[in-house]
Image: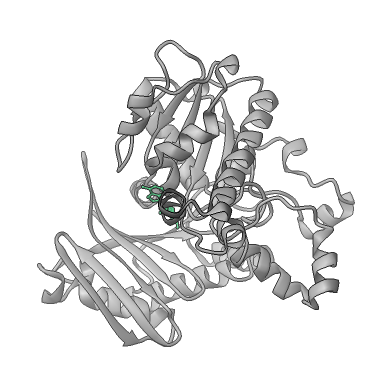
Amino acid sequence: MHILVINCGSSSLKFQLIEMQDQVEQALAQGVVERIGGEALLTLRAGTRRIRKTAPVRKMRDALALVLEWLVSPESGGPVIPSLASIHAVGHRVVHGGEKFRSSVRINAKVMTGLEDCIDLAPIHNPANINGIQAVQEILGTEVPQIAVFDTSFHLTMPEPAWMYAIPYSLYRRHKIRRYGFHGTSCRFVSQRYRELTGRSEANTNLILFHLGNGCSVTAILGGVSVDTSMGITPLEGLVMGTRSGDVDPAVLELIADKEGMNIHEMQALLNKQSGLLGISGLTHDMRDLLEEVQENGDRRAQLAIDMFCYRARKYLGAYMVGTGGVDAIVFTGGIGENSDVIRDQILRGLLRFGIELEPEKNKAAVGGQEGRISRDGLSPEVWVIPTNEELMIARDVLRLVTT
Ligand code: ADP
């Protein structure tokens, strides 16, 4: 079965075409259309064939049409698929499912209404997801099953003290203002892979999972389910990220507004797009570039950004170790978590009194997609590196829901 996995943002469309058969799970093609709304940049890949080109793309529907045209054209190499009829089902990464969507669902009119109801919670992302769903319906027809997979649903198992904000309860009752958490699809993929690698049961899966990419979060998992996570009603809360501040005293908003003459929308953009590693270093949001900058030029603020990133992660580790009463493993995933032995080492350095110590050789070796345990033999909690694959998790959900 060919499954198209789509991730629609406000001005971008990411996709993967995945073949799912008995024991085969293979990405046949993938790519991204960026800067939708103007002269868009298309980056498309199938096997060894890569294409980068620009084209005027007015809206999501046009972006999807270009991608689909490419998949069935000789330009994609095979073509990748003989015709659009070869696409059996479509899976959408949906950012916010609020309290409504506890698991992935097949999309119908009622689900679309539910997605619209969640727009208040994710005013930029959810409308883009809805556009993507409608674009698929228009181009592939309503017969092709579409599945929504939510970033938030994995965390709906959190207990109330973990998800409530200590603000007037009426705000939760009236507007559902509470913590939701994100990166849930990644958490599901990685904990499933952890079980495969260790032979543990779901009930015996007790982890603290760091997803460190451009967006960063840490999740505490007990008995296979999420019991706390660092992101909140939006992905802004928690760890220091590429361009997001993570936790700040909310009183800074009024101060910045007064001193800089900014309105609430400008401040929201400041905390989401100009803060984090980029804001502190003044150089870049990209961890690899920051590490290089420190190594080559000894840049002080690049070092400060890295130190703050690691210290915040350590603080959350401490909070979740005690909050959960202890776990069996700490797991790293995401671009930084999967590739940077230096950052993993800095986050976990000097914690032997809590049973945590890395094996330097194993830590150095676990980069570039390598998975495995990187802690010293016999210690608990163990430390693991497990690369994530959110698209594959979505494709698995699609397969399960269209075949049952
Ligand atoms: P996204 O959250 O957008 O999916 P990724 O998970 O791909 O992003 O993570 C991107 C981050 O991973 C960037 O900060 C990038 O610099 C970092 N990264 C990738 N490779 C390395 C590396 N070898 N060392 C340090 N950081 C890395």
Q: Quadrant of the C terminus?
A: top left
Q: Is residue 126 above or below residue 374?
A: below
Residue 182 appears in the picture as rendered: no
Please state which of residues 277 and 265 is positioned toward the viewer in this rendering.
277
Residue at left offset 45%, top offset 85%: 37
Q: Residue furthest front?
A: 297
Residue at left offset 49%, top offset 40%: 187
The image position of residue 97, as x and y in percent, is: 59, 56
According to the image, what is the colour scheme of the structure? Answer: one colour
The image position of residue 257, as x and y in percent, is: 81, 72
Residue 367 occupies quadrant: top left
Q: Is residue 63 above or below residue 296?
A: below
Is 55 situated left or right of 288 in this image? left
Q: Is residue 34 above or below residue 271?
A: below
Is 181 situated left or right of 196 in this image? right
Please state which of residues 173 and 48 is positioned toward the viewer in this rendering.
48
Residue at left offset 47%, top offset 25%: 202
Please state which of residues 156 and 386 is positioned toward the viewer in this rendering.
386
Is 305 situated left or right of 75 in this image? right
The image position of residue 162, as x and y in percent, is: 73, 38
The image position of residue 273, as x and y in percent, is: 59, 66
Q: Quadrant of the N terminus?
A: bottom left
Residue at left offset 57%, top offset 64%: 282
Count of picture labels? 0
Q: Residue furthest top?
A: 378
Is 43 situated left or right of 376 in this image? left
Residue 337 appears in the picture as rendered: yes
